[in-house]
Image (cartoon, helix red, strand yellow):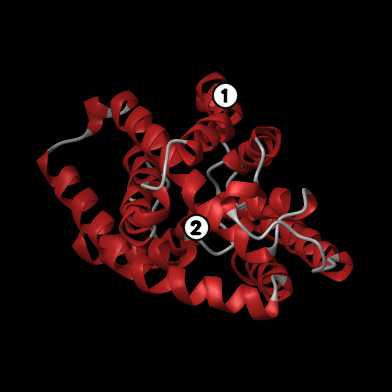
Amino acid sequence: MDTIHAVILGIVEGITEFLPVSSTGHMILASKLMGLAQSDFLKTFEVAIQLGSILAVLVLFWRKLTQGLDIWFKLAVGFVPTGILGLTLYKFVKDFFDPLTVAYMLIFGGVVFIVIEYFYKPQHKLEHLSEISYKKAFLIGLFQSLAMIPGTSRSGATIVGGLLLGLSRKCAAEFSFLLAIPTMFAATGYDLYKNSGILDAQHLQILLIGGFVAFITALGVIKIFVRFVSHFGYGIFGIYRIILGSVFLIFVL
């Protein structure tokens, strides 16, 4: 893996981290197209550079994060399910980092989004983060834990949970973005700790390049995405997931 690979995967990560299409899944599929084997370092890279995208959330949403401790407590509650299951199932989950799993989960998640959008009614939805209860935050966190399987999509799972629990499209997206902060800081830190023995100076340089590119790319994607789903919904992402997963199953895998 070289610098060019890191830049390409950083762009893929920055574009897809906050779209409900699975950033990890896209990086695994992109790696497959570039002929990169799913080595221990590549698996760590695919987790760690997501921190670059999360830093973009801190930059863009700092006002919401500094309005009080309530939002931080809700994010902590939402993180609990993923934190517990992540520590318990870490080694097991890494075994699913393969293109075949990603393709199937992309298709399954796409069907879920289309079904939910079909039945979605915009009336009487929670529009503001302050309206989310601690119970809803915890339940959304349970949905997020499903995304440990590559191809599911962390943002996709949390957005689906939010929509089913009565959040508006925009509110569900924003809470998903913010919930990524504790989740990805913890996931990245734990993964780097567990794999510190395989990392050398060149690996760290590649990680920094990929993370920086992901950060810059995500800055532009987040605002566009929020405006888009506020007006058009998530159905188009469901269709995209089904098409992409099917193409890989038929022509690549």
Crowding at label 1, few (<14), some or many (≥20) Cα neighbours within 10 Å? few
Total residue callouts = 2
Q: Disc 1 designates what residue?
A: 89
Amino acid on which the number 1 mark rests in the picture: Leu
Q: Which of the marked residues, 1 or 2, is nearer the chain's N terminus?
A: 2
**Residue 161, position as x, y percentages in the image:** 72, 48
Assign the N terminus to one quadrant of the image: bottom left
> Residue placed farthest to the top in the image?
88
Drawn side of residue 121 relative to residue 4, left or right: right
Q: Is residue 18 above or below residue 229?
A: above
Residue at (43%, 36%) from the top-left corner? 69
State the residue in front, 134 or 84. 134
Which label belongs to residue 29? none
Q: Disc 2 designates what residue?
A: 23
Mark 1 vs mark 2, CA separation in Å: 20 Å
Tell me the element at label 2. Answer: helix
Crowding at label 2, few (<14), some or many (≥20) Cα neighbours within 10 Å? many
Amino acid on which the number 2 mark rests in the picture: Ser
Q: In this view, does 43 lie above or below 93?
A: below
Residue at (48%, 77%) from the top-left corner? 224
Assign the C terminus to one quadrant of the image: bottom right
Drawn side of residue 47 relative to residue 41, left or right: right
Answer yes or no: is residue 227 visible.
Answer: yes
Residue at (67%, 59%) from the top-left corner? 106
State the residue in front, 240 or 60. 60
Residue at (23%, 67%) from the top-left corner? 4
